[in-house]
Amino acid sequence: MKNKCAVLLLACSMPIIAFAQSVSAPTLKEGDTWTYVDTVEKGPTGWQQTHNALTVQRVTESHIYVSSKPVGASTSGNEAIVGADWSRAREFDGSEVVVNRPLAFPLTAGKSWNVEYTEPHPTPKLSSATWTTKYKVVGYEDVDVPAGKFHALKIEAEGDWHGQIAPSNTVVQSAQVQQGQTTLVTQARRVTPETTAGHTYKAFWYVPEVGRWVKSVEEYYGSNGVRSERLTTELETYKRSAP
């Protein structure tokens, strides 16, 4: 009787133990390839869709060298360097800063991490913008993409951005007609610095055997709470050189 109870307790605990196990970084090799359908939505009507292939060129201890090109293109494509955890970095004032880290290995349910950076002059209208994003591993869920159905580990990220509108000068000219004579009046106005803000949402569905996420969604909202842009990627095919 005691043996039967022990076996029953062990069987009940196995899903919990499996769920609690951490997911390590994948072993990537030259030639590993993923093709995605990328959809860009801007505003209420803007829409564009492309099919792109991402291929590993070289792997070092701290970086992954990849090339990206449209599916079927004969050119070699654009080459870029990303972190070993697929993070992206940019250089601001001579310093390299991580701007996106969808994965932070080892991955376990409930794990969270933050990414924060300030970008000088991100647009002609902004003198600076600060982005703060908190990532969290939510847990496993099933997801359907063109490559098939996967049981994926979902990572969600919510964040805010605050921008400083750069001061500027505007010149307004008007014509005044009086007693048959026309006079041009020029007025110079200076736009004082102001602060604007917005919100971001991201989600990534990571599958260990694929070595990368099978789906991702990134959304950007303005100060009025209205979504200005959504970027969606869905896996179509993949090829791994190592298990």
Image (tube, rainbow, N blue to C red):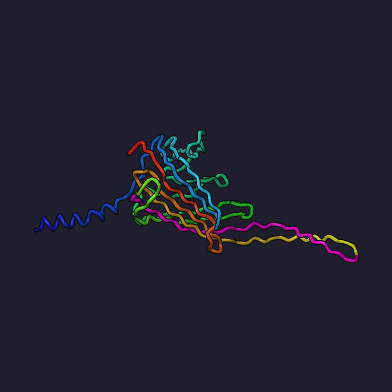
Q: Nearer the viewer, residue 79 or 228?
A: 228
Main structural element of the magenta stretch: helix, strand or loop? strand
- With respect to residue 55, does 3 lie above or below? below
- Which residue of the protein is positioned furthest toward the right in this rendering? 179
Q: Relative to the observer, which residue lies in front, 198 or 175?
A: 175
Q: Is residue 39 magenta?
A: no
Could you tell me which quadrant the C terminus lies in?
A: top left
Q: Position of residue 96 (x, y in %)?
A: 52, 45
Q: Position of residue 115 (x, y in %)?
A: 47, 53
**Residue 194 in view in this figure:** yes
The residue segment tinted magenta is: 150-179
Task: Classify residue 166 by image quadrant.
Answer: bottom right
- Is 168 inside the magenta-drawn segment? yes
The residue located at (56%, 62%) in the rendering is 223
> Is 160 positioned to the left or the right of 243 in the image?
right
Indicate whether 149 appears above or below 179: above
The answer to whether 222 appears left or right of 27 in the picture is right
The furthest residue to the left: 1
